[in-house]
Amino acid sequence: MTHRNRRSFVSAVAATGTLGLAGCLSTVEGWRETNGSADGNSTQSASDGDAERSDGGNSVADEPSGLPGESIASFETLDDWMAMIDAGDLEAATDDPYAGSQSARLTADEGTEYAAVYRTYPDGLDLRDANLSLAVSFTGREQLHLELELLAPNARNVYAMERTLTGPTDRWVRVDFGTDRVETQPDLSDVREIRITARRRGDSSGPIDCRIDDLRAVDRPATGRVMLLFDGTLESHYETAFEHMDEYGFAGVEAVIPEAVGEGGRLTLDALHELNDAGWEMAARPRTGANFIHEFTPEQQEGMIRRTKAYLENRGFEDGAKHFVTPRNVLGTETVDLVREYHEQALRYGGGPNALPLTDPHNVGFFAGDAGEEARTYVDHAAEYGQLAVLHFEEIGDGGMSEDAFADLLAYVDERPVEVVTATDLLADRGRGGSGGDN
């Protein structure tokens, strides 16, 4: 990735929705003042715990601008980070770092299962009110699985976050980590170790080669969010899902494939307008057939993205047209640059919830809404930890998710202390400092 593209990404994040520092940094600053242990002894704050910064590493001027929160690991030195035994290698990468003068590079050869690094905090790190994000760039494969674990205070008490990355390769993206699992009873006011693990996904062969940078803590909002995302422009979204959604006053986000509108088993334009009048949003989802979008030429990709957005705008769906739903989930290097140019937000498979406030609106992850208990657990995590759970649906009934199961899931969401939002609501959240007024 060129320096121009990296800077363009950081600038785009700052410009999109104005990821304001107001309202978020105030609480981060408060960690320095109130961060203490039960016995009154001071523990390390999110800023003070970063040895890279205390020894003259990343200056404020070197940090990515416009992002909420504060960096708790800049990777300007790697003295405090170690590769785990039999888990690949760790080295500094000075070629096109995300921020500052270097990033950390994790590698593992084909015979090594994963690449993992860790860092200890002997006095503890207080992250009880924080959500975490990380800048990542990987090469040599289309998919990568990342895990971020907090040992609080030991390996028996683990707070684990995960994300599946389906491209792009050789581009910096930010991962807003959502909660995947909680083991025993971790005390997030006393985090003694952070582990970061990269694993193969999809193709199980080949080496692992990824870079990480700017591990960032943001103030988590008091209220979690749930988004209900419907893919494929399918008729059952109107005929079946709409009635159940309307019962609770929930609005969904429909991924619209222009070429499919009005075809057999697909939504008509009149149905799209009725959904829109009920508060739903019509997001852009280009038609790629059996191919991934990155398999087309850059010119063809731009044409697909531009025409799909114009279709929505020309039919009165301007709000939804700001958002992109990735066809078949995989993004190529040229694709993500084009998506950032034409859209303010992008969604694709991520396998779990997202941290809020978002630090990369073009890397919003979703998971299967028909995943049963797993889906409900992720909704619970969004409620408890102030995160965003995007539930992805295709067919409702007729061989897809049963209508009864869908209705039961909506009832479960309604019972949880979460707010059901649209994609545009997330943009408004960022315009209010990322919290939606809950901090």
Image (cartoon, helix red, strand yellow):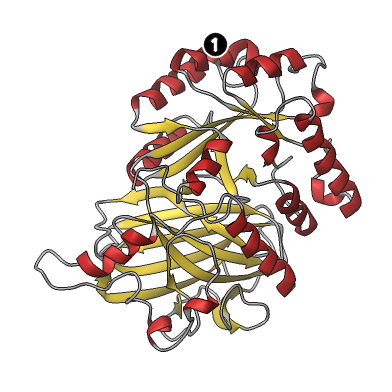
Amino acid found under the numbered disc labelled 1: Glu
Location of residue 61 with respect to 412 vertically, above or below: below
The residue at 45%/23% (across/down) is: 409
Report if residue 125 is visible in the image: no
Camera-side residue of 222 and 139: 222
Q: Where's residue 118, x and y in %?
A: 42, 73
The residue at 51%/17% (across/down) is: 245
Is the residue marked by circle 1 packed among few (<14), some (14-19), or many (20+) residues within 10 Å?
few
Q: Where's residue 113, x and y in %?
A: 56, 66
Location of residue 113 with respect to 122 vertically, above or below: above
Camera-side residue of 307 and 401: 307
Camera-side residue of 429 and 140: 429
The residue at 24%/52% (across/down) is: 185
Camera-side residue of 276 and 181: 276
Report if residue 344 is visible in the image: yes
Q: Where's residue 63, x and y in %?
A: 52, 73
How many numbered dots are placed on residues in this image? 1
Q: Is residue 297 left or right of residue 331?
A: right
Location of residue 198 with respect to 83 vertically, above or below: above
The residue at 35%/46% (across/down) is: 385
In the picture of the structure, the residue carrying the numbered disc 1 is 243
Residue extending farthest bottom? 55
Q: Where's residue 209, x and y in %?
A: 64, 71
